[in-house]
Image (cartoon, rainbow, N blue to C red):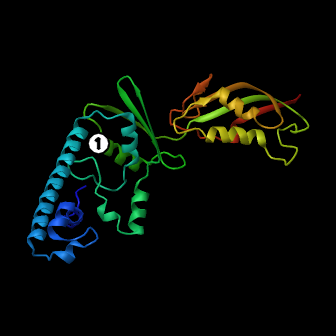
Amino acid sequence: MSRTISDIQTELQNEFMHNATLQRLYGFTADDSFTAKFNAVSIESLLLYIVASAIYTLEVVFDQHTAEVEAIVAEQKAHTARWYVNKAKAFLYGQPLVDGTDGYDTSSLTTDDAERKKIASAQIVTFAAVTEDSATLHLKVAKSGPAPLTDDELAAFTAYMAEVKDAGVRLNIVSQAGDYLKLRLEIIYDPMLLSADGLSTANGAAVVRNAIKAYIEGLPYNGELRINAMVDAIQAVSGVVMVHPVSAQYSETGSTWQSVGNRCTPASGYFDFSLADIEISYSPN
């Protein structure tokens, strides 16, 4: 960013006063002030002002050139998956894009706390993930919760992404309710530490189910559910001796179910998970 003429002039004056040759010529010291030795209309002051103005003009030209080059690069560069994620999260519901650009003018929305809250409430996409398959980018998005966008929000977001995406890119946008998950587990437990229904004998907490809940809810958006990792989380519970995953199934709609196998990624990007969907049988060690 270019400096002001005043800032540049001050730096030149300081350099002038610290120059040993000029000190001998004019008879001042490095501790003297330029403005105390030379008035505003002196030849020295006017010359430094002219030089400062020229430097300022050059810096402004450099700034403009840099901005133009960055704009050209941004227009010609093929964007990455991370760019699409960041662009999705930058969406402002109810705000128009600046004509001919892929961004918003928020200068009028940042003057006070109320306006800043307006921006925050318009920035509805909290979660976003991109995968690529058959030359198509699949963009999954969700609001805080996670939760799907409403029909109106999705229509606005789809129009926004059509405007900002690279030309020729096929984009499939997904924003839907979380996938369902059903689990059946057999657990061998230490009866000194756990009860027959998996509660802690120390405080009565449902430590096994809580461990499962914490693992699933702790998955990153569009993260893989890995059966081995879930088993490790359960076996870390005090009193659990062994875990046998009998079955694990997931479904987009709750009607057609698929086996998780060793791992799976939810089609929606997250699971709509309930502890009631866990069936556990306990056997003492």
The residue lying toward the viewer, choosing from 69 and 235, is 69
In the rendered image, residue 25, in percent from the top left (x then y), is placed at 14, 66
Quadrant in which the N terminus appears: bottom left
The answer to whether residue 265 shows anywhere in this view is: yes
Quadrant in which the C terminus appears: top right
In the rendered image, residue 117, in percent from the top left (x then y), is placed at 43, 63
- Crowd rating for badge 1 (residues with CA inside 10 Å; few <14, some 14–19, many 20+): some
Q: For residue 23, what is the image quadrant?
A: bottom left
The amino acid marked with disc number 1 is Val
**Residue 135 against residue 60 in the figure, above or below:** above
The residue lying toward the viewer, choosing from 26 and 10, is 26
Q: Residue at x 36, y 39 (%)?
A: 83
Question: Which residue is under mark 1?
Answer: 164
**Residue 169 against residue 94 in the figure, above or below:** above
Residue at the extreme right of the image, as rendered: 192
- The count of marks equals 1
**Residue 133 against residue 114 in the figure, above or below:** above
